[in-house]
Amino acid sequence: MISRKSFKYNKISEAITAYMMLLPDLLGLFVFSFIAIIYAFHISMHDWNGLTEMKFIGISNYLSALGKSEFWISLWVTAKFVLMYVPAIFCSSLLLALFVQSIRGKMQQFYRLVYFLPHSISVVIAGLVWAFIYDPQAGYLNSILNMIGFEKQRFLYNPNQALPCIVLVNVWLALGFNMIIFLSALKEIPISYYEVAEIDGANFIHKFIYITLPLIRDTSIFIAIVSTIGAFQSFDVIMVMTGGGPVMSTTVTVLYIYKQAFEISKFGYASSISFLLFFIIMSLTLLQLKLFANENR
Amino acid sequence: MYINRKYQIILNILGIVLAAIIVFPIYTLVVTSLKPFNEVFNMKLIPNFKTISFSNYIEVLKGRRIIPYALNSLIIAVTVTILGLFFHSMGGYALARLDFPGKKFIFRWILSTMMIPFAATLIPLFIIIRSLGLSNSMRGLIIPSLPSAFGIFMFKQFYNSLPKELEDSAKIDGSSFFGNYLRIGLPLSQSAIITLAVILFFANWNSYLWPLLITQKRELWTIQLAIANMKSEFHAFKTPWNLLLAASCMAALPPVILFFVFQKYLVESIKMTGLKA
């Protein structure tokens, strides 16, 4: 028999144990995420070089960002990056997943493993190897172009080519990860659906449009959104490969923020842009969710 | 489904071609790291086997360009992995198994922190760590990497999938709540532990941005920083790609080995990421 009192005591000790067990992570997330984002807003309202006293200037940082062409250029570069990266990673990982799914027997495991391999390579190392492949003098890509009769290209040193080159490296790094998410969604689809469709005389394309696509809808939305958010924030490959150049052709907004804060110590100004970016990302996510929700329903 | 044998052969040829393209940069990495300097830009796909050797590796190791930084990375990655596993499994267990006021709110709050973009917290995070006096220290490299909403979420999902009866029998014996976690929950979560351990080790061994921001002292460089800096330290016009890529190969080895050994766990964890949708 458990008395009422000891039951209550038990409840309290359960709650205390739970809070203690959650404490390390909660404290960390509270300081490094929650406080940090509020603090970012606070900094963005000040003129501050990170060392001397902060000077409150209201929304001046936001206004000066909106008035600077550098900011708009960085936003344009980011937009180009997102518009190249998201469709590229989406289509290539979906196609690769469909391909791996259609392989029978043991080879399926093998392909999955091999296509997933770049996932284990770090951004720094990937940046180095690809810079070697893109080398304007004698890199592999140029020697292939040479072989099939094209002129040498400057790739990372050409303002028109640098960004697509970097997008390709990002796609290469993320391909396997996204393929596996698509693959697990494809495996959930019962084979009987396809069999019934085949009896009705459906071809490959019919099956893809009327069975596969609707049934992997949630996964597609997930990948589209996560890739978009990731693309808006991606700048590590750029840091390693071009540092934002040539000219400003690969200076995405996050890199612009990074440089303003950590190279010329304009912490207030940089924070205001990171807040603007935060809102852009949030609103785009919501918009994308809404658009997808309306389709097919 | 009717499968044509010929069709499968064609698919497999395509598969091998795709594999060759995707693996090509890694092949380049390995092959170039074995070449002498004057053959680096000999772009034949098959290298000259007479000149191939491990001498680049020896040179990089002799110049102490790798080992001190690899040790730093190892300390950081191992510490974050072990402490992180402990914290996240505790948090996940509490959310899955214990009953307490505010549980739903706390769980939602944890998930919502995943929505905050890293780019928006980079500056305040830097300032916070600096004002805590942790910049240019091992602790400054380790502590911000510890909290993980994903880690808690993963363990919560895992403990939810375990049958509750396991603890019920223990409760009658008068075991405490924390004792249940230590004696029953934790030993049963081997697969979740391995999965998250691989993810955490990967992320911390390969991380670049945070160490770049927070370490000015060379002694604290991580392996990724050391490699990124190597390129600019060498001669500006004649990049010694062979040495650079030999160092990269060594830095890539631990995650690649982990990848091959634990790829099943990695795949499972990625599937879980997709399930969130």
Image (cartoon, coloured by chain):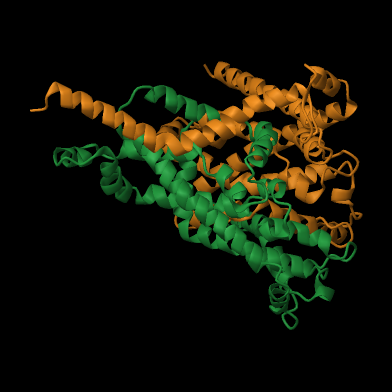
Chain colours: A orange, B green
Q: How far across and down, in percent of the image, does residue A43 sit? A: 72, 26
Q: Is residue A70 above or below residue B253?
A: above
Q: Is residue A249 above or below residue B10?
A: above
Q: Nearer the viewer, residue B75 or B1?
A: B75
**Closest to the observer: A113 or A225?**
A225
On the picture, is A170 further left or further right than B177?
A: right
Residue in view at x 49 percent, y 38 percent: B150
Q: Residue A279 appears at what percent x and percent y?
A: 68, 22
How many numbered discs sit on the rendered protein?
A: 0
Whether residue A115 is visible to the viewer of this picture, yes or no, is no
Q: Quadrant of residue B176 in the image?
A: top left
The residue positioned farthest toward the bottom in the image shown:
B50
Q: Tell me what residue is drawn at x 62 percent, y 56 percent.
A: B19
At which x and y percent is residue B15?
A: 59, 54
The residue at the point 30 percent across, 32 percent down is B98
A223 on left or right of B173: right
Residue A70 visible, this angle: yes
Q: Which quadrant is home to the N terminus of chain B? A: top left
Q: Please identify the quarter of the rendering in which residue B29 is found.
A: bottom right
Q: Position of residue A90 (x, y in %)?
A: 63, 37
